Amino acid sequence: MISKKMFDAMKEQIKNEMESAYIYLSMVAYFHSRNLDGMAHWMRCQVHEETIHAMKFFDHIINRGGEVVLLDLKQLKLTWKNPLEPWKDAYAHEQFITAKIHNLLKVARKENDYTAEPMLAWFVNEQIEEENNTDKVVRQLEMVGDSKEGLFMLDRELGTRIFVAGSPFDPAAYNLLQ
Ligand code: FEO
């Protein structure tokens, strides 16, 4: 059975992951409103991925005999002044999530929770990719500067993102995301 401390920390992480999905969904709306459909597509994939992250914690708690209680979500941000700003926010948000995952691992170690550790190790690795993906776009956007052509090309490229992970609500499907 999961300890109360571990349970509380994971319960908060479900909220953090769902808030990630929520802020990225705001970015989907923002990018569509600026006719940057490729960036919007990339962020749609990200909303899907974040929902899977939340469900991994959700199912971990259930599988260990806990009862999930969902916390209130905050609307983190609704709009941005240019296309670079949401990517900067996404990168900063991923750094925030990385710190939260590291803290979860600290709790697991303090609680001698050997069952949670492999799952948290997956998230530690995942965060390398999450930070790198968003940071890379920040650097590319800074490189193209005011070039409309550069922005158009980058938008086209981000629109090719393929995300195959199945439904976030079907563990058999979302566990494809290894
Ligand atoms: Fe679930 Fe983007 O971290």
Image: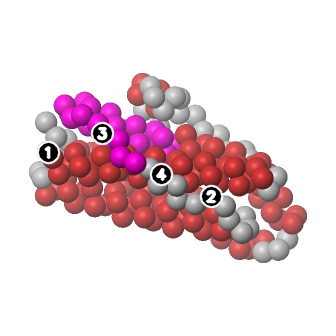
Would you identify the image quadrant in which residue 114 lies?
Answer: top left
Secondary structure at numbered mark 3: loop
Does the Cβ of the disc 1 residue fall within 8 Å of ligand 1?
no
Percent of width and height locating residue 2:
16, 40
Percent of width and height locating residue 165:
53, 33
The Cα atoms of the two marked residues, 2 and 1, are separated by 36 Å
Q: Which residue is mark 1?
A: 3
Q: Nearer the viewer, residue 75 or 51?
A: 75
- Mark whose residue sits in front, 2 or 1: 2
Q: Earlier in the sequence, mark 1 or mark 4?
A: 1
Q: Earlier in the sequence, mark 2 or mark 1?
A: 1
Q: Is residue 51 magenta?
A: yes
What is the three-letter code of the residue carrying label 3? Val
Q: Earlier in the sequence, mark 3 or mark 2?
A: 3
The residue depicted at 52 percent of the width and 47 percent of the height is 21
Residue 30, compared with residue 169, is above or below; it is below
What is the three-letter code of the residue carrying label 1? Ser
Rendered image: mark on residue 19: 4
Q: Which residue is mark 3?
A: 69
Q: Are marks 2 and 1 in contact (CB under 8 Å)?
A: no
Does the Cβ of the disc 2 residue fall within 8 Å of ligand 1?
no
- Mark whose residue sits in front, 1 or 4: 4
Q: Are marks 3 and 4 in contact (CB under 8 Å)?
A: no
Q: Which residue is mark 2?
A: 78
- Mark whose residue sits in front, 4 or 2: 2
Q: What secondary structure is the stretch in magenta mostly built from? A: helix
Residue stretch in magenta: 49-72
The Cα atoms of the two marked residues, 3 and 2, are separated by 26 Å
What is the three-letter code of the residue carrying label 2? Leu
Secondary structure at numbered mark 1: loop
**Residue 158 can be seen in this image:** no
